[in-house]
Amino acid sequence: MQPVPENRKISPGLVFFLVHSIQVGTGVLGFQRIISMHAGYDGWMSVILAGMLTHVIMFLMYKMLGTVKGDLVSIHTYVFGKWIGHFFSFLYALYFSLLVITIIRSYVEVVQVWMYPRLSTFLFSLFFLLLAYYIISGGVRTIAGVSYLGTLLPSYLVLTFVFTFKYADFRNLLPVFDHSVMDILLSTRDMSLTYLGYESILMLYPFIKDPERSQKFAQWGLFLTTSIYTVIAIISFGFFAPAQLDKTIWATLSMWKIVEMPFVERFEYIGIANWCLIILPNVCITLWCASRVVKRMTPIKHRHTLILIAVLCLCALTFIDKRDQVNVLNTISGQTGFYFNFLYIPLLFVLVYIAKKVKKQ
Amino acid sequence: MKRHVLLIFMASVLLSGCVEKEILDDLYLETGKAYDYVSENRIRGTAVFPIYMPDKSIENGFLSEEASSTQEVIEKIERRAQQPLVRGALDVVLIGEKLSEKGIIDIADSLQRDASVGARVFLIITEGDASDVIQGTYGNRGNGIYIYNLIEHNISKRELPETNLHMFLYDYYQKGQSSYLPIIKKTPDNNVAITGIALLSYDKVVGKIPDEDMFFFKIMVDRIAEGSHVIKMGKNPKKPEKNIEASVTSLHSKQKIIMNRKADPVKVDVEISIRGIIKEYTGDTLGAKQMAEVENRMKADIENKCNAMVKSFQELGIDPLGIGQYQKHGVRGFDLKEWKKEVYPKADIKVKAKVKILEAGTVE
């Protein structure tokens, strides 16, 4: 791999925004129902548990990347050699593309259900991907800038949850430990899906100045996400009765239905429109990662792999038009993400460790 | 670079045209809705929407249809509406007496399902037909807004306990909690009045709190409550033909439920503490002694009324105070069926009140 020129690298502090902004996406709008399926209102513990897991995985990823001094493709070639390594890298390219599709489609679904039922998935995705293409062609620095804005500008949305306190009854969380440890672990697995996305650090690593030092910022980014998710989970558990939450697909959006402001009758519309800004860095980073993996494996130029993957994603997007299909899509990408992150990465870590030992001899 | 800017510009122009526009002047904004029972599987829905006249006054438009579901009602009404009806500004949903006894969850569910309906909508039970109540001419801002304001100010300043669509659904879905809704009726002089609170078992109305007892109900169910209560102090010792009355306005009231979950039967203490001011006193002087007496009388009033009310809730098998919920918070693997059948009807529930009069106005 040829080294990345200094003027295209980002400062380590920006990793904080990259990691945080890619984690927060459409998942936040409705993860509460999913975690309460197994663990009920003990689900907030799963949020924290899954958050702690992400810290461990992040640590493992940095260790691997530090060993091979490259990205995921380098790790794979290091461990498996060129051909098998490329096969695994290709799976990751597919996975990142799947994330692009899932993010855009879930957001379009929200817009269709809540605002414009006749919004065309194709047109919206087309223009959204064009915008993402425009940003990505500016390089990793531009993407980092978008992540920064995508974190900062919509951050005021956290304040709107204050409106729900009046109706929230936090005794709902009692009794604590009403569910078995197994239930809590199952819901930890379900929760880990909402945290997905931070594995993009595997591809971003070579683009960070002084990458060793950036781990601290990456971990803080994860910590912020965990705190926000925990707070939102606890607020939603206070706000909804358990059986009511079971019926609510987008609990976060439904909570906005109670917000009352003198200048706006219904706050969800502002919230959803703002969510576009949160989605944008998500799409940019995952799309960049997917095209970057393909670029590293083949002699094709990055610009061309980017266009290729964007077009493929767009084609796939137009085929998904029903709620249950979107649901299936979410489940598939969630589960693949779970296996890729929480099982494959520790395994890969062990393999890197072994390979290092073997190569030394 | 220029090419990209052009692209973005084109994107914004094209994107803005790709969904349907809704211009406010070309719509009927539904502000109120009434549902009535017609027969099994058939309801009558009436929509009210303001029509803005050229002279800036507002008239009420009504459209009414019969169908088997709320969505079908909307479809049928839509066929007769000159302009599209939208539900985004819906404020009140009135439910007729008869329908409320059959169950109202279908209506609440369709409201909850509709993304364009907010969670602050008031669900209201009416005495008599709901369509009759909604079809009048009240105020000058349209009937929906009129009824909304009526309920709103009675919640924030008077004796109506807090309620809205979200709270109704919360209570409905919560284990060990029953919901309640306000009742209104049309008065003969073509006005609307609140006449009490409907008590529901799941989604069916099974009982009623009359308007004069709403104060006691509110201080039991609301976490922070305002409202006022008139205390009969008995005969004036100097002028026997005159009764002494004191009117106390509660500024602040708090309710606390303390449970002894292990006891058999379960022992529940509902502690209510009120801090209020005397707004009116018809006796001669109002000194420290009289104030203490007012406090004691009010305490006795609250305890008598509330204890009687709680008894009747136990007999009806409903739980608007959410005592079952309190039980659930301390018990792992809470069994709702057993609670409803065995424990709750036998539970020893006592209401205790603490009254503190802070001020008595500008004269003594």
Image (tube, rainbow, N blue to C red):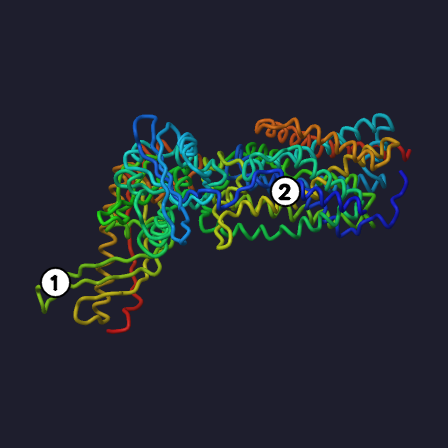
- C-alpha distance separating marks 2 and 1: 75 Å
Rate crowding at label 2 as few (under 14), some (14 to 19) or many (20 or more) other CA atoms within 10 Å. Answer: few
Please indicate, yes or no, whether residue B258 appears anywhere in the rendered image: no
Q: Which residue is mark 2?
A: B16
- Classify residue A357 by image quadrant: top right
Identify the chain of the residue marked 1, using the numbered disc in the image.
B
The quadrant of the image that shows the C terminus of chain B is bottom left
Q: Are marks 2 and 1 in contact (CB under 8 Å)?
A: no
Residue toward you, A137 or B52? B52
- Classify residue A191 by image quadrant: top right
Position of residue B207 measured from the top left corner of the image (x, y, whole percent): 26, 39
Give the left or right position of residue B207, taking residue A151 as reference. left
Q: Which mark is residue B235?
A: 1
Q: Earlier in the sequence, mark 2 or mark 1?
A: 2
Q: Count all numbered tags in the image, as a single digit.
A: 2
**Badge 2 element:** loop
Identify the chain of the residue marked 2, using the numbered disc in the image.
B
Residue toward you, A3 or A258? A258
Give the left or right position of residue A343, taking residue B180 as reference. right
Q: Of the residues shown, which amino acid type is indicated by label 1?
A: Lys
- Identify whether B56 is placed above or below A44: below
Q: Of the residues shown, which amino acid type is indicated by label 2?
A: Ser
Position of residue B112 measured from the top left corner of the image (x, y, whole percent): 45, 38
Position of residue A226 measured from the top left corner of the image (x, y, whole percent): 63, 45
Rate crowding at label 1 as few (under 14), some (14 to 19) or many (20 or more) other CA atoms within 10 Å. Answer: some
Please indicate, yes or no, whether residue B160 appears anywhere in the rendered image: yes
Q: Residue furthest front?
A: B54
**Badge 1 element:** strand
- Say yes or no: labels 2 and 1 on the same chain: yes
Q: Residue furthest bottom?
A: B363
